Image: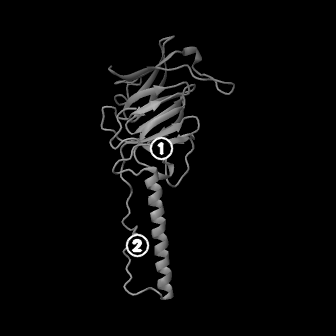
Amino acid sequence: GPVRTARILLTPQIGPQKRDNFADKRPLLGMCKSIGSSGTSLPYCCVDLYSLRTGEMVKSIQFKTPIYDLHCNKRILLVVLQEKIAAFDSCTFTKKFFVTSCFPCPGPNMNPVALGSRWLAYAENKLIRCYQSRGGACGDNIQSYTATVISAAKTLKTGLTMVGKVVTQLTGTMPPGATDEDAVSHTNARRSPLVPGIVTIIDTEMVAEGQVLLSEDSDSDGIVAHFPAHEKPICSM
């Protein structure tokens, strides 16, 4: 059937503690076709790995959603899906980590990524302030690093003012005519919507196994950079 994407895989980087399980089959070709080797998966939901030495299929990796691209270096095979990325060890093809927070790009490239010898860049679906690095674009809806610091200082000042008002109310020294116009209300606070143009760069050797998730409430290892790169969705890297 029709082939959506195909890539010749690089010979993996091995060492004393790392053995290539497919050394006698290489070079390998990764291919995503409309009909996978099993014949039971949905169209373009399977990556089949073929040996260019023997002509046989040596591995098949199944997914529940369509695959849009394949990337690789000497460490990982990267499978790109819509809004998701899955990375597999290049020696064993077991899953190393996955990302589920990619921005839903309208196309033509549904999920743009850039993979180097070790770092991976992809479009994140929102800006997480505690991970924001210096630089990047500053659009109407995205604050710069300096503006973020100034905003935090203003918020702190407002908070201290509110504490002062509470103390004066409790001690009965609130001056007549005082209002609460400066109070900040959090009752209508909502989750921030998806933000286009955000780029995250991770070190594929430093991130933990499993899901890579940037959150205000948790620490994530291997984050190299996280910044606004454009006001509109990123279509290519």
* 176 versus 80 height, above or below: below
Q: Nearer the viewer, residue 137 or 16?
A: 137
**Image height of 96 relative to 129, above or below:** above
Question: What residue lies at 50% left-to-right and 54% top-to-bottom?
Answer: 216
- In the displayed structure, 43 sits above or below 132; it is above
Residue at far right of view: 16
Q: Picture coordinates of residue 134 (x, y %)?
A: 49, 45
Q: Disc 1 marks which amino acid? A: His
Q: Quadrant of residue 38?
A: top left
As displayed, is residue 192 above or below residue 174? above
Relative horizontal placement of residue 104, taking residue 207 as reference (left or right): left
Q: Is residue 128 visible?
A: no
Image quadrant containing the C terminus: top left
Say what amino acid the circle numbered 2 marks.
Ala
Q: Which residue is mark 1?
A: 226
Inspect this view and state whether residue 203 appears.
Answer: yes
- Quadrant showing the N terminus: top left
The percent coordinates of residue 152 (x first, y second) are 47, 60
- Residue neighbourhood size for the residue with mark 2, other residues' Cα within 10 Å, grouped as few (<14), some (14–19), many (≥20): few
Residue in the picture at 49% in, 20% down: 9
Q: Residue at x 38, y 25 (%)?
A: 39
Q: Secondary structure at mark 2?
A: loop
Which one is in front, 133 or 85?
Answer: 133
How far apart are labels 1 and 2 at the CA level? 32 Å
Disc count in the image?
2
1 or 2: tag closer to the N-terminus: 2
Q: Quadrant of residue 148?
A: bottom left
Q: Position of residue 198 (x, y in %)?
A: 41, 43
Residue located at (48% from left, 89% from top): 172
* Neighbour tally class for label 1: few under 14, some 14-19, many 20 plus, Cα within 10 Å: many
Look at mark 2 in the image and give the residue it sits on. Answer: 183
Which element carries disc 1, helix, strand or loop? strand
